[in-house]
Image (cartoon, rainbow, N blue to C red):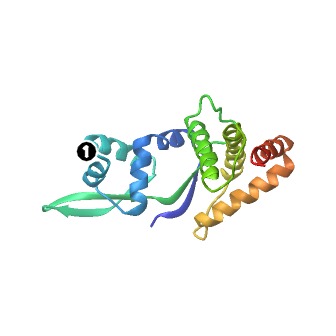
Amino acid sequence: MADEIRVIDDPKIIKLLIDETRRAILELLRLNDLTVDQMASILEKDQSTIYRHVEKLLNAGIIEQTGEKKIHHIPKKMYGRTAKLFFLAPGADAVPEKDELLKIWENTSGTIATLLEQIGYEGDGDHAEHAKAVFLEIEKVVSEKMKDLKPDSNMSFYMVWKLQTAIMMLEMERDPELKKKIKEFIRAYD
């Protein structure tokens, strides 16, 4: 049975998980256990390519064989995730220009600015840059705190979200620079 949440702070595994194809495989396996053939068909990629990615995920302990399925009387291995949620925690020492995960975080922060506009929060001209700066800093601070978390079976995605929010609020009061960035972000939407 898959864990509810697994915190990953090993840089090698984090690097493995930021690959676009492996992220797509994990997204597919969020819904159902699948064979390599099924994943290749859905992702419209060659089976050998998917198999290589599956092997890397297996070796890292991110996915596991969950059973077999017979297709035309031929047994095919089924694969599933070893956790419902993987929380990547590279730590505060990660460098934005060199760390691929931070680049992904930066891109999603820009998307947050766009989504805020869609729901009625009008920002000034630099609001997207403020969003990137503040969310990148928050991600780094929260991941540094979360990397020592030992989730148990009672931990849910909702609990992790609340824990992240609590960490952010506490760290904002402890870290004047983070507080300043958050205030600049808020002012960009006033």
Q: SS for tag 1?
A: helix
Question: Could you say where residue 173 lies in the image, as x and y percent from the top left?
Answer: 86, 51
Q: Amino acid at mark 1?
A: Gln
- Residue count near mark 1 (Cα–Cα under 10 Å), binned few <14, some 14–19, many ≥20: some
Q: Which quarter of the figure has residue 34?
A: bottom left
Residue for badge 1:
47
Is residue 128 shown left or right of residue 58? right
Question: Could you say where residue 50 lies in the image, as x and y percent from the top left?
Answer: 31, 44
Q: Count the marks: how many? A: 1
Q: Residue at x 59, y 33 (%)?
A: 99
The residue at the far bottom in this view is 154
Q: Residue at x 71, y 46 (%)?
A: 138
Vertical side of 32 occupied by 87: above or below: above
For residue 141, say whether it is visible.
yes
Q: Which quarter of the figure has residue 55?
A: top left
Is residue 84 shown left or right of residue 96? left
Front residue of this view, candidates 43 and 69: 43
Vertical side of 140 occupied by 70: above or below: below
Q: Residue at x 30, y 52 (%)?
A: 42
Q: Residue at x 71, y 45 (%)?
A: 123
- In the picture, the quarter occupied by the N terminus is bottom left
